[in-house]
C-alpha cells in the first residue's frame, strides 16, 4: 500500500475514533481523552491509536480499560467509515507526551520569576486605556510622538465658512 494511502487511512482512523469517543461513547470511565494520532499497518489489519488522558494514573488506567471494552463498538463505526476488506483491530496506547509538556511548562513557570517590568508596563497601558475610555477622549500621536486630539466630526458636519457668492 502506498504511503499516501496509508497516511489517509491513518487520518480517517484517528478522526473516526476521536468522533466516536467524543459523541457516541457513553462509558463513564472514558473521559478527558484526546486522540493524538493513529498508525495503520501496511495491510490495514491492525492500527495503533495513541491517546492522551488527563488525570491520575488510576484514572488513566480506568480510561484505557474502558476504551478496550468499547473497542468492538469503535471498530464497527470504523468499518462503516473505511469500507475496506478488513477492519483494523485497534490497540489503544497511552501517550504521555502531552502530560509531560504540561508538567514541564508548570515547572518552568515555578522556576522563572515573574517579569515585574512587563507587568508594570501592562498595568500602565491598561490604566491609560481606562482613563482615555472613561473621559471619551482618544488621542493619536504624530510623527514626533506628541499627542494630537482626534476630531470626531466629519467634513459634512462642519459648516462652510466661505462667504456666500
Image: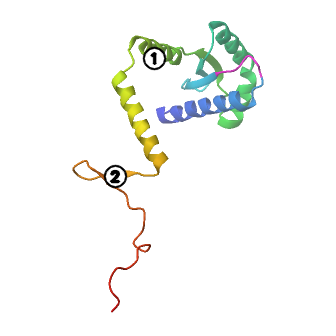
In the rendered image, which quarter is residue 104 located in? top left
Residue 99, given in percent of the width and then of the height, sits at: 53, 15
Query: Is residue 100 depicted above or below 146 in this figure?
Result: above
Residue 5, given in percent of the width and then of the height, sits at: 52, 35
Residue 136, given in percent of the width and then of the height, sits at: 46, 51
Q: Residues within 10 Å of mark 1 (few under 14, many from 20)?
A: few
Q: Residue furthest bottom?
A: 165
Residue 83, given in percent of the width and then of the height, sits at: 67, 37
Q: Residue furthest left?
A: 144
The residue that label 2 is drawn on is 140
Query: Is residue 35 depicted above or below 133 in this figure?
Result: above
The residue that label 1 is drawn on is 105
Q: CA distance from mark 2 to mark 1?
A: 39 Å
**Residue drawn at (42%, 69%), measured in percent from left and top?**
154
**Residue drawn at (65%, 32%), measured in percent from left and top?**
16
**Residue drawn at (48%, 35%), measured in percent from left and top?**
4
**Residue 93 seen anywhere in this rendered image of the structure:** yes
Q: Residues within 10 Å of mark 2 (few under 14, many from 20)?
A: few
Q: Is 49 left, or right, of 112 in this rendering?
A: right
SS for callout 1 = helix
Q: Main secondary structure of the magenta part?
A: loop
Does 55 lie within the magenta span?
Answer: no
Q: Which residues are magenta?
A: 27-32
Viewer-proximal residue among 13 and 3: 13
SS for callout 2 = strand
Amino acid at each position: 500500500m502506498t504511503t499516501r494511502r496509508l497516511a489517509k487511512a491513518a487520518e480517517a482512523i484517528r478522526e473516526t475514533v476521536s468522533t466516536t469517543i467524543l459523541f457516541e461513547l457513553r462509558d463513564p470511565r472514558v473521559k478527558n481523552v484526546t486522540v493524538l494520532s493513529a498508525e495503520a499497518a501496511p495491510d490495514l489489519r491492525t492500527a495503533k491509536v495513541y491517546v492522551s488522558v488527563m488525570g491520575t494514573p488510576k484514572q488513566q488506567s480506568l480510561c484505557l480499560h474502558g476504551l478496550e471494552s468499547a473497542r468492538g463498538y469503535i471498530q464497527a463505526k470504523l468499518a462503516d467509515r473505511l469500507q475496506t476488506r478488513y477492519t483494523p483491530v485497534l490497540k489503544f496506547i497511552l501517550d504521555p507526551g502531552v502530560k509531560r509538556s504540561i508538567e514541564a511548562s508548570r515547572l518552568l513557570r515555578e522556576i522563572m520569576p515573574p517579569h515585574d517590568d512587563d507587568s508594570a508596563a501592562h498595568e500602565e497601558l491598561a490604566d491609560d486605556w481606562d482613563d482615555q475610555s472613561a473621559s471619551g477622549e482618544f488621542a493619536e500621536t504624530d510623527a514626533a510622538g506628541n499627542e494630537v486630539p482626534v476630531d470626531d466630526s466629519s467634513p459634512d458636519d462642519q459648516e462652510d465658512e466661505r462667504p456666500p457668492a
